[in-house]
Amino acid sequence: MNKSIILAFESSCDDTSVAIMDTDYHVLVNLVSTQPEHLAFGGVLPELASRLHLKNILLLTQNALDRAGLKLSDINAIAVSVNPGLIGSLLVGLSFAKSLAWSLSLPLITVNHMLAHIFANFIDHHEISTPFLALVVSGGHTEMVHFKSLTEFEVIGKTLDDASGESFDKAAKLLGLGFPGGPIIDKLAVTGNPEFLKFPRALPPKDNFNFSYSGLKTSIRTWLANQEASDIQANLPNIAASVQQAIIDPLINKSVIWAKQHNIPNILIAGGVAANSQLRKQLSEKAAKAGIKVFYPSLALCMDNAAMVASAAIPKYLAGIHAPLTSNAFSLKGTKEL
Ligand code: KG4
Ligand code: ZN
């Protein structure tokens, strides 16, 4: 079969993104427009996010086509993420994708945002094969998902409270470091000692593959309340390294133990926290000792982007699985469908 061209949209949170990709997983263009307008509020304002998506999406699509040197008539399918996410933001992308699919008589392919994060791995690593364990770690999700094939998967464990990215963000907020917290803590931790403070690791990995981070948040808050502000400032790299280690330890231990127990040769990391330098390094080292290979996307592809949406749409496109123009967006959490 000749390769086809997919035009994809991502607008589930505060990044508007448009990508054009062929069905051999080659990215022709992947444009992301971020929304710095939220920074002043210390978090994402949903209504503002929807309005900015609406403002950006047409121009970004025109730019993407120009940069790829293509016309709308060169496109073979339209892909869009429809869940989970902010409902207003998702609806902007979905409505835009639907109107293009309808006016151009092209198939519409709807994609789960978390699965798209997992499929970002295939853009950099065409060689990945199933079975694999996906460790999905983002601002809203922490899940271990076992893929028996690209279309057959089950969730092995998930967080019972805060997500791993959310824990980075909340720790950074308690430390007065800004938003989003993950990249700031990652950078600060480079010169810090991860053994400086021993924060709790909930749910020991022996037979429990769920995660819990609420105890960590409480113990950071309690510890900080008993310190002098000057001591906190002087020890910021050590505190950051200790917090980071407490968040990534359960992710590393549980995924390697489960993969080993079930003879799974590959672990894929996905989502914003997959950008964490120590998670990438320590998981790769620990898994290698057990003969397991770890894959992660390039830094840009860890963040929300439309190339990952196109990548997740490829198996559906090749299998002829199209979505009706009556498709809706929904904000439900989790890796519910492919
Ligand atoms: O996947 P993503 O872009 O958005 C969601 O779908 O949630 O993930 C955003 C999350 C934020 O919580 C952010 O703090 C975290 O990813 N993050 C990181 C790093 N870069 C982004 N966490 C740890 N280390 C990083 N380098
Ligand atoms: Zn995401």
Image (tube, rainbow, N blue to C red):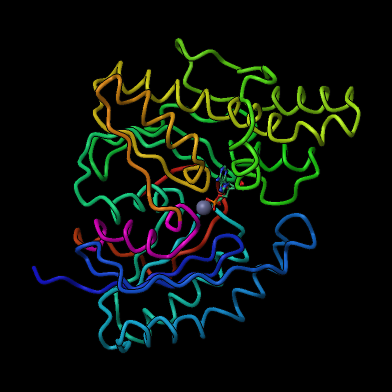
Residue 14 horizontal/vertical position (percent): 61, 63
- The magenta stretch spans which residues? 300-317
Q: Which of 175 and 38 is in front in this view?
A: 175
- Name the residue: 81% across, 22% down: 223
Q: Which of 32 and 322 is in front in this view?
A: 32
Q: Is residue 86 above or below residue 3?
A: above
The extreme top residue here reads: 206
**Residue 156 figure quarter:** top left
Residue 325 horizontal/vertical position (percent): 40, 72
**Residue 241 figure quarter:** top right
The extreme left residue here reads: 1
Q: In this view, does 317 lie above or below 269?
A: below
- Name the residue: 67% across, 75% down: 51
The question of residue 302 being in magenta is answered with yes
Q: Nearer the viewer, residue 27 or 102?
A: 27
The question of residue 180 being in magenta is answered with no
Q: In what quadrant of the picture does the N terminus appear? A: bottom left
Q: In this view, does 230 lie above or below 336?
A: above
Q: In this view, does 244 lie above or below 179?
A: above
Residue 153 horizontal/vertical position (percent): 32, 37
Residue 128 horizontal/vertical position (percent): 22, 44
